[in-house]
Amino acid sequence: MIWLLSSATLGWVVRSLNYPPKSADPEEIRMATALAKINYSRRMVSRVETGDDVWVYWSCGGMDDVSRVCDLSVGGLFLSTPTKRPVGARAKLDFLVREGQIRVEAVVQHLIPNGGVGLKFTAITDRDCPNLVALMNRMRTLACTPAPRARLFVAASH
């Protein structure tokens, strides 16, 4: 079965993400608040940066490519690619991630020449939707985890 991404489906996916419960401890609330500030935009669904960890194999307009996902939401993503794709073109994507198989259909929403394309999800299979939720949760966790800092070397004074 393929789910067309209606507002009801999108709502189910958003509710499935691991946001802190109302009874969360102060640290969970602080991290969720920090993430919300980082990802603030006019979008209905927040995006999360993926670093170098998420790639997709995708087909669009008779061309196949492998590209890095720059940011991701349950409604779409932005791919880093130098190849132009026309706005409105349909695409099929297969995520190359450890969460398992995630296949989606999408449409090109915008283009940044020599930068990439923004794709809006239009359909996802019911078997793949939980894997997309797991990927989003992993990316959100990584975004909230402070990067380890190198220790400063302090020379002892004599």
Image (cartoon, rainbow, N blue to C red):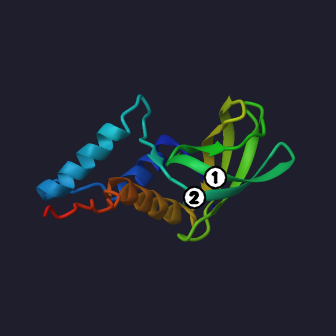
Mark positioned earlier in the residue sequence (1 or 2): 2
Asked if the residue under mark 2 is in contact with the one under mark 1, i.e. CB atoms within 8 Å, the reply is yes
Which residue bears the numbered disc 1? 68
Outermost residue to the right: 62
Which residue bears the numbered disc 2? 54
Outermost residue to the front: 158
Q: Residue 31: image x %, image y %?
A: 24, 51
> Amino acid type of disc 1?
Arg
- Give left or right: position of 97 versus 7: right
- Give left or right: position of 63 versus 52: right
Q: Residue 32: image x %, image y %?
A: 26, 49
Q: Residue 118: image x %, image y %?
A: 62, 37
Label 2: element kind: loop
> Amino acid type of disc 2?
Val
Label 1: element kind: strand
Image quadrant where residue 149 sits: bottom left
Q: Residue 109: image x %, image y %?
A: 64, 33
Observer-nearest of 17 and 6: 17
Q: Name the mark on residue 104.
A: none
Question: Looking at the image, can residue 3 be seen?
Answer: yes
All told, the count of numbered labels is 2
| Mark pair 1, 2: CA separation | 6 Å
